[in-house]
Structure formats: structure tokens, C-alpha cells
């Protein structure tokens, strides 16, 4: 039985000159890759448990897990190629071929990989951050992978963005240093309105929305921004914190509703677009 198994494992699958690919080599390579995956998962869980006991920051844990993943899979791949009978000289030839491939067609892949490493160690982007890209895309960072970063938009859609876009383009990270953000809610009132009453109505609206922050230097306020064509343009500036920063549409809706109700209660007119036409006889 053992002799039959040895004979079967030594059967050649592919012969190219001096190189012979045998079933035993393929089985060993598959086994090495499976063991590498198991080791990677074990190290990931162990590092997470150790970080939890030591109170390490979640982003540091994520970086350690990613680096360990790359190292384990890299070593596993080299061992698997060795098990397949690929010599070191052949590996150098493969590396040279990859270098040529990188020079001709893999620049973007390598660029995204390097940018992903920079993002991880620079910590300019972290899991859970809420970012706005140059094209106006808003989303929460869910994963930072080798080639791309996964964003989840306000519509709960998953968007895959190449890592190079975060390095080469301007990115507005709303939660990089803290999770407090100012919102400016625009509204208009008709000419002839009492601006003091308008301010009181706006501040009352801010008080009615429970997410409004009131601290030193971040108090809500009402500002007049422009004397427009149809009315007086104003903004209500408020500050919000935490998960509300990641829901700008909901926040704007709540404050606009409160502003409208308070202006209506105070009998302050909201202007409609209008135009004066002078007819010459």
C-alpha cells in the first residue's frame, strides 16, 4: 500500500527539459499554502488578543495583522515554489521576468501596493474613517487591502478605490484627528425680516435637535452670508460628533426641518424666487 502511494506520488505531471513536476510536489505545495493560511489566521487572532490585553489602538492592530499576513503568505509562496522543484536560480529568473512585467504592464499594481503600505504606516487613513474624495464621493473606510481600499457609501454601496488615488489626489478625512465636525445649514428669509428674530429662530432650531454640541468655541450660531436676489441668505452653524458626522444628509434634514418650523412659528417669511419687470410705454 505504501509502495503504491509512493509510486503514485512520484508520477510526473509535467516534464520540461531538466524540470519534472511530480504529484508529490503539487501536494506539498498545496499543503504549505494551507498551513500558511492557518498560521496567518492564528497569528491574526493572537495579535488581536494580545493587543486587546495591552490596550493598543485598533489601527495599530490592523497594521500588525496586515504586515503579518503579507509576510506569512510571502514565505509560504516561496516554500511552495521550492516544493514544486523551482530552484533558487529559477526564482531569480522569475523575479527578472516580473521586473520586466512591472516595467511594461504592472506599474499600476505595484504603485497601488506601495501606496497601500504608505497608507498603513502613515496612518493618514484608518478603518472607520469617514472620507470625501476629490470627485465628491463620501464613504466610510472598511478595509485597506494590497491593491485597493474598500469604502462604504451613504447608500450602503461598497466602492473599491485604488490606493494610489488616496496618495496622488486630495482626500478630505473628516475624522482623522477627532470625530467632531461643523455643519453649515443654509436657508433664506425675505427682505424686511427682523434679523434678530431670525437669529433666535435659528438658535431655537439648533436647541431642538438633540445632537447639537455646546462647548467652548463650538457653540451654534446664525450668520448672514449674502443679500441675495430674492432674499437674505443665512446659515446656521452647528457642531456634531460621533456617528452623526458620517450621516450628513440626515443631519441637514433634521436642522432644515427645525428651522422651517421655527421660522413659520415666528411668522418669518421664506422668500420665493422673484423678479421685478418694468414695462416702458
Image (cartoon, grey):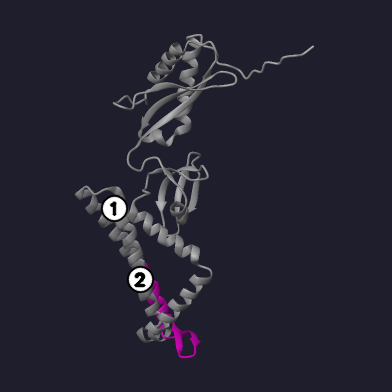
Find out whether residue 21 is within the magenta segment: yes
**SS for callout 2:** helix
| Picture quadrant of residue 7 | bottom left
Q: Is residue 25 left or right of residue 13?
A: left
Residue for point 22% across, 53% down: 50
Q: Secondary structure at mark 1?
A: helix
Q: Give the residues in magenta.
A: 9-35
Decide: few, some or many residues near mark 2? Use Cα within 10 Å; few <14, some 14-19, many ≥20: many
Q: Which residue bears the numbered disc 1?
A: 61
> Which quadrant is the C terminus positioned in?
top right
State the residue lying farthest toward the front.
281
At 50% from the left and 63% from the top, the residue drawn is: 108
Percent x, y for residue 206?
Answer: 40, 20
Report which residue position mark 2 lands on.
Answer: 76
Can you say which quadrant of the picture contains the N terminus?
A: bottom left
Q: Is residue 229 something one can see in this rendering?
A: yes
As drawn, the label of residue 199 is: none
Note whether 184 is above or below 12 in the view shown: above
Amino acid at each position: 500500500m505504501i509502495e503504491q502511494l509512493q509510486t503514485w506520488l512520484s508520477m510526473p505531471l509535467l516534464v520540461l527539459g531538466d524540470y519534472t513536476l511530480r504529484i508529490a510536489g503539487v501536494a506539498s505545495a498545496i499543503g504549505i499554502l494551507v498551513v500558511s493560511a492557518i498560521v496567518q489566521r492564528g497569528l491574526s487572532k493572537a495579535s488581536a488578543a494580545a493587543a486587546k490585553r495591552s490596550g493598543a489602538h485598533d489601527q495599530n492592530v490592523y497594521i500588525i495583522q496586515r504586515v503579518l499576513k503579507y509576510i506569512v503568505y510571502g514565505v509560504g509562496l516561496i516554500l511552495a515554489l521550492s516544493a514544486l522543484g523551482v530552484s533558487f536560480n529559477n526564482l531569480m529568473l522569475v523575479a527578472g521576468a516580473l521586473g520586466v512585467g512591472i516595467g511594461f504592464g504592472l506599474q499600476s499594481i505595484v504603485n497601488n501596493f506601495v501606496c497601500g503600505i504608505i497608507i498603513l504606516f502613515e496612518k493618514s487613513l484608518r478603518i472607520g474613517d469617514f472620507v470625501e474624495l476629490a470627485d465628491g464621493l463620501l464613504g466610510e473606510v472598511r478595509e485597506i487591502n494590497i491593491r485597493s481600499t474598500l469604502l462604504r457609501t451613504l447608500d450602503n454601496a461598497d466602492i473599491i478605490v485604488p490606493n494610489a488615488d488616496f496618495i496622488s489626489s486630495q482626500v478630505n478625512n473628516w475624522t482623522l484627528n477627532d470625530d467632531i465636525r461643523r455643519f453649515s445649514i443654509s436657508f433664506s428669509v425675505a427682505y424686511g425680516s427682523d434679523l434678530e428674530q431670525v437669529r433666535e429662530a435659528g438658535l431655537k432650531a439648533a436647541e431642538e435637535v438633540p445632537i447639537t454640541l455646546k462647548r467652548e468655541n463650538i457653540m451654534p450660531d446664525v450668520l448672514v452670508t449674502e443679500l441675495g436676489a430674492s432674499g437674505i441668505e443665512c446659515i446656521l452653524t452647528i457642531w456634531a460628533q460621533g456617528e452623526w458626522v458620517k450621516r450628513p444628509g440626515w443631519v441637514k434634514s433634521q436642522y432644515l426641518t427645525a428651522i422651517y418650523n421655527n421660522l413659520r412659528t415666528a411668522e418669518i417669511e421664506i422668500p420665493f424666487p422673484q423678479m421685478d419687470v418694468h414695462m416702458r410705454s
